[in-house]
């Protein structure tokens, strides 16, 4: 299991370093397929927060802290509530939720990008869209470990600067994923992922390596090509997880 987990971490972490998001979208479904939904989503929360923290340390000067405050406030409020409400969900239901969240989330983000217009759907500087996006991301992180798609859709519709948006996402993902993991561990009976001490160490090294790989790839591969890879891998993993949760694929 560990080699496959490391592969998922390397690919997801590298894509997140290049595009600003993608760790949970890419690695999440495969981790859930490997160790199950409950522990898999919690592990993705922990690893996703760590991956974003590593990236945040390098892009912190570009973060829009005021924008982050609204996003994070909504996430912090919704994650504990979502953790309690979803604590009784079965493994297959969580797997189906993870897969559906990835597939639908990616589709919504892509459609938002295709429907990009010159004007905004709300006035410039409006706070409620950021609060709504943060809240939806918080629920998605608890249910499926995925908070990126609503943020991507919001950024496109709000005409956010892509570079500043990608930087601001990193501290948001740290707060969002950490809040989700802490809520599950403190408010529910969610078990810790089945990793030994030395395995956590190897995973930590893989996260650092993924960020470095992302740096190298970003210099030689067009961003558009990387984004296409992210989309394809996310859809494949999300679909497989959804089908196993629905009982179509064997466990």
Image (cartoon, rainbow, N blue to C red):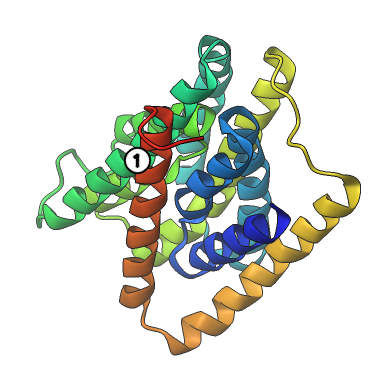
On the question of residue 233 being in view, the answer is yes
Residue 134 in view here = no
Image-quadrant location for residue 38: top right
Side (left or right) of 224 relative to 202: left
User: Residue 62's spot in the image, x, y percent?
Assistant: 52, 64
Left or right of residue 27, residue 134 in this image: left
What residue is shown at x 32% (from left), y 29% (from top)?
128
Please state the total of marks drawn on the protein image: 1
Name which residue lies at 31% across and 68% down. Answer: 228
Secondary structure beneath label 1: helix
**Residue in the foreground of this view, choosing between 64 and 251:** 251
| Residue 153 coordinates in the image, percent (x, y) | 28, 46
The residue at 54%/65% (across/down) is: 11
* Relative vertical location of residue 152 with respect to residue 40 in this rendering, above or below: below
Q: Which residue is mark 1?
A: 150
Within 10 Å of the Cα at label 1, are there few (<14), some (14-19), or many (20+) other Cα atoms? Answer: many
**Residue furthest bottom in the image:** 220
Instruction: From the top left corner, tell me how far across and down residue 248 is, in percent.
Output: 35, 33
- The one nearer the camera, 140 or 136, is 140
* Of 217 and 165, the residue lying toward us: 217
Q: In the depicted view, which residue is nearer to us: 31 or 115?
A: 31
Q: Would residue 171 be found to the left or right of residue 199 on screen?
A: left
Give the farthest residue toward the front. 250
- Residue 174, image x and y in percent? 62, 45
Residue found 69% across the figure and 21% down from its top: 190
Task: Tell me: 10 left or right of 191.
Answer: left
Quarter of the rendering containing residue 87: top right
């Amino acid at each position: 299991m560990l080699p496959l987990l490391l592969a998922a971490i390397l690919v997801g972490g590298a894509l997140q370093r290049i595009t600003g998001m993608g760790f949970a979208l890419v690695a999440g479904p495969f981790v859930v397929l490997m160790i199950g939904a409950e522990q898999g989503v919690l592990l993705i929360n922990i690893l996703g927060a760590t991956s974003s923290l590593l990236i945040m340390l390098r892009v912190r000067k570009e973060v829009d802290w005021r924008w982050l405050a609204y996003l994070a406030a909504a996430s912090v409020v919704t994650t504990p509530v979502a953790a309690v409400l979803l604590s009784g969900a079965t493994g297959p239901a969580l797997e189906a939720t993870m897969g559906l969240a990835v597939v639908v989330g990616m589709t919504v983000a892509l459609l938002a990008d295709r429907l990009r217009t010159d004007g905004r759907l709300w006035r410039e500087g409006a706070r409620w869209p950021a609060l709504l996006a943060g809240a939806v991301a918080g629920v998605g992180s608890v249910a499926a470990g995925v908070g990126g798609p609503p943020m991507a859709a919001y950024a496109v519709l709000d005409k956010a600067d892509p570079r500043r948006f990608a930087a601001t996402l990193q501290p948001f993902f740290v707060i969002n994923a950490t809040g989700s993991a802490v809520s599950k561990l403190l408010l529910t009976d969610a078990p810790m992922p089945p990793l030994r001490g030395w395995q956590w160490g190897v995973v930590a090294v893989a996260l650092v390596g993924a960020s470095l790989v992302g740096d190298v790839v970003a210099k030689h591969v067009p961003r558009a090509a990387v984004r296409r890879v992210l989309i394809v891998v996310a859809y494949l993993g999300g679909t497989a997880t959804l089908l196993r949760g629905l009982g179509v694929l064997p466990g």
